[in-house]
Image: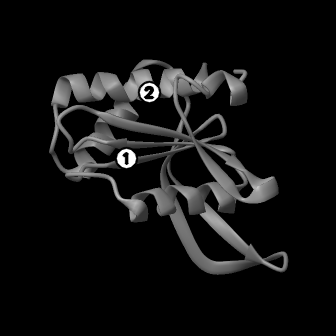
Amino acid sequence: MDMYDVVGTVMEVYNHLGRGMAEPLYQEAVEKEFALRNMTVEREKPLVTYYKDEPLKKVYYADFYYKGIIIELKSVDELNSDHRAQLFNYMRITKQYRGILFNFGEESLHTERYLYIPVNDRFVLLNQDNYRDYITD
């Protein structure tokens, strides 16, 4: 249910603010909505990358982290491969297997839920047809 809870939270923000505003406004509103729902999240979670068990100096920041889910927010006309690659890299770095990409810039809230399968370094776009094949929460 965790992914559903996240989607519902972000959808509430979209219903109140609408589309096309600046990404930082959505980040702040989403953080407030998580708090209103008593959902403990980490905002701008630092993601450390390692090389041969040594941390690298470059640190990335995920918009939100909730119960093993990397959450990225965008406010652009259309999601592209760079947005997806950012989420995928964050999932690899943290070894977290669930990620959600939201876009507030389209006519309606666009949501993409992904599952990372490290065995073959593959990302699966989850949808209503395959969701139960992969997620049991």
Mark 1: amino acid: Leu
* x and y percentages locating residue 96 in the rendered image: 69, 48
Q: Is residue 39 visible?
A: no
Identify the element where label 2 is drawn.
helix
Task: Name the residue: 77% across, 57% down.
Answer: 120
The answer to whether residue 120 is left or right of residue 135 is right
The residue nearer to you, when weighing 114 against 32, is 114
Identify the element where label 1 is drawn.
strand
* x and y percentages locating residue 35 in the rendered image: 44, 26
The answer to whether residue 53 is left or right of residue 126 is right
Q: Which residue is mark 1?
A: 73
Task: Name the residue: 66% across, 21% down.
Answer: 132
- Separation of disc 2 and disc 1 at Cα? 11 Å
Q: Which residue is mark 2?
A: 7
Disc 2 crowd rating (10 Å Cα; few below 14, some 14-19, many 20+) is some
Pointer 2 and pointer 1: residues touching (CB < 8 Å)?
Answer: no
